[in-house]
Image: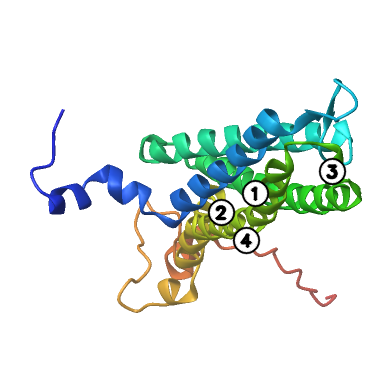
Amino acid sequence: MHLPESLSDLADSETVRFLRRPKSISRIFGGVFSLVIFSSLLTDGYQNRTESPQLRCVLNSNHMACSFAVGAGFLSFLSCLVFLAVDAHESRIVGSRFKTAFQLLDFILAVLWAGVWFVAFCFLASQWQHSKSKHFLLGNSSAKAAIAFSFFSVPVWILQAYLAFQDLRDEAPVPYKRSLEEGSVVLNTLSPSSTTNPANPPITGPNSLSYSSSALSPYMTTPKAPRLVMMPDS
């Protein structure tokens, strides 16, 4: 394992340059925010009331709210880890079609996650507004943290969608490039400048497919029919 000898070597290393990319930074922030959301609700999101030992969700005793936030946070965290790992091995991806499909999937998922976290923020904030904090001894800070980081996740995923769209726009599809190259070859072949150029006269000879009319006239002329002459009666 190669260890950097100085701070300058560490700053110029491949790992540091990868982590300093805007896409990597946005994925790290998205993963951290998702981790905070589902871990805070898993640890302190379910509490019992003062008069009952039964565990309830601190968000207006709505188990759907806690389950939705925990599930979305866990899946979003896994999504960030998977895409971050694929970005680390992006240079090993040889197929252009697979790379384009990956960038398209990245853009679609980023847009979906931005919408999911916007809905989650509105839903969790509404449930917290209708809940009574005095019914639970703990869990208030966890609910507030989940709501806050749900809101912070929206611009992070919008940024990821924008970066994915930039990569998708810069990467032109291979069939499109190939069609342009083939079209340019056909246009150059059939251009009138190449056929009427005096520097390239048509080649004539026994092996050529084009002969002049003068060369073919003694042999290929159309035979004429004999004329009938009317002789006078004697």
> Which numbered marker is on residue 164?
2
Instruction: From the image, tell me which residue sits under label 4.
Output: 223
* Label 2 secondary element: helix
**Where residue 208 sits: x, y (%)?**
39, 54
Instruction: From the image, tell me which residue sits under label 3.
Output: 134
**Where residue 102 sits: x, y (%)?**
56, 41
- Gap between marks 2 and 4, in whole Å? 76 Å
Of 136 and 11, the residue lying toward us = 136
* Label 1 secondary element: helix
- Gap between marks 3 and 2, in whole Å? 45 Å
* Image quarter (top left, top right, bottom left or bottom right) of the C terminus: bottom right
Amino acid type for the residue under numbered disc 3: Lys
* Label 4 secondary element: loop
Amino acid type for the residue under numbered disc 2: Ala
| Sooner in the amino-acid sequence: mark 2 or mark 4 | 2
**Left or right: where 7 falls relative to 71:** left
* Label 3 secondary element: helix
**Left or right: where 109 falls relative to 56:** left
Res 198 quadrant in image: bottom left
| Sooner in the amino-acid sequence: mark 3 or mark 2 | 3
Relative height, residue 92 to residue 223 (above, below): above
